[in-house]
Amino acid sequence: MHPPDLDRQIAAWLHAAPPVDIDFADIAAIRAMSDAYMRETGGPAPRFAHPRVRLESACFGEVAALVWAPTDQPSRGTVIAAHGGGFIVGSALGAERIAVPLAADHAITTVSVEYRLAPEHPAPAALDDMITVLSHLDAGTPKAVHGSSAGATLAAGLALWARDHGIRLVGQSLSCPALDDRVVDDVWSPTWTAQATRWMWRHYLGDDEPPPYCVPARHEYLRGLPPAHIVIAAHDTLRTQGLAYAQRLRDQHVAVTVHDAPGTVHGFDGLLPDSAAARSAVDAQVAALAGWITGGTAAEITEVRAEP
């Protein structure tokens, strides 16, 4: 039974298409499920084409990426994005929902990294791909990072790496982030279960000690990181670790906005993009990224509807 506070649109969606019961130890089964979902929902293909946005494939060193750029004016900066998918599925198209409005409305380029997937390429391979892309970008333009779920692990890890290597990032946008392999909430979380979370980390990290920057919450020193905007879902096995990381950032004097979305589930802003909850969350992410890159505040770009 769904909890009484569940968002009505999300509840209807879950009723119509309940999540598949799957063993997250089985990589082939997970990838087959992901492929089936993409076929049923119109992908993998761009869904939000815009006349003022150009989408191209690119390579940065040996790392592939998709690039969304404005067509009618020079780019004002770049967002480096990482898709979700538990480190084992997904593609660079996962950044489309933030990339199109960033390019069309704010003249900001998004580079979404087609990072190597686990378990064939365990940590730190995916993070190394993010670092490679960052190292190939123009040092003179403002840059921020964005990631969803496992992609938020990579985005937060890249922010830590950049700080320690003297590279300035202006902000980090983390949606339903996976930040701590030691914390799992055993709660009702239909789109990303506790079992899935544990297997995600095992597929990515193996049985060894995590490499540096691959588990952001394991880093004690967070001072000097760029400001963060963190989307937290109400019913998510990752909820506690996201809130804890936000508080640790605040405690170490890093500016943080938390968009705590009531009645939502893990990945809601990507799984149900037409819902009111998703539109609110995506608008807030775009506003934060645009504000950091253009030098304004999110409120000056558009209203950020963050819950306390």
Image (cartoon, helix red, strand yellow):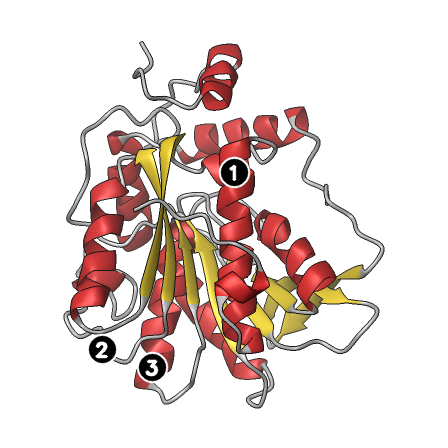
Residue 84 in the figure: left or right of residue 104: left
Label 1 CA crowd tier, 10 Å (few <14, some 14–19, many 20+)? many
Q: Does 95 appear above or below 131?
A: above
The residues bearing labels 3 and 2 have C-alpha atoms spaced at a distance of 9 Å
Q: Which residue is mark 2?
A: 223
Q: Which residue is mark 1?
A: 278
Where residue 217 sits in the image (x, y, percent)? 21, 60
The residues bearing labels 1 and 3 have C-alpha atoms spaced at a distance of 31 Å
Q: Does 33 appear above or below 47?
A: above
SS at circle 2: loop
Residue displayed at 30% across by 84% down:
164
Three-letter code, disc 3? Arg
Q: Does 167 appear above or below 193?
A: below
As drawn, the label of residue 163 is: 3
Residue 72 in the figure: left or right of residue 162: right
Where residue 120 sits in the image (x, y, percent)? 42, 51
Residue displayed at 33% across by 14% down:
2
Three-letter code, disc 1? Ala
User: Looking at this view, is 118 or 76 the one in front?
Assistant: 76
User: Looking at this view, is 160 or 279 the one in front?
Assistant: 279
Residue 3 in the figure: left or right of residue 291: left
Which mark sits nearer the N-terminus, 2 or 1?
2
> Which corner quadrant of the image does residue 199 belong to?
top left
Where residue 161 sits in the image (x, y, percent)? 34, 77
Three-letter code, disc 2? Arg
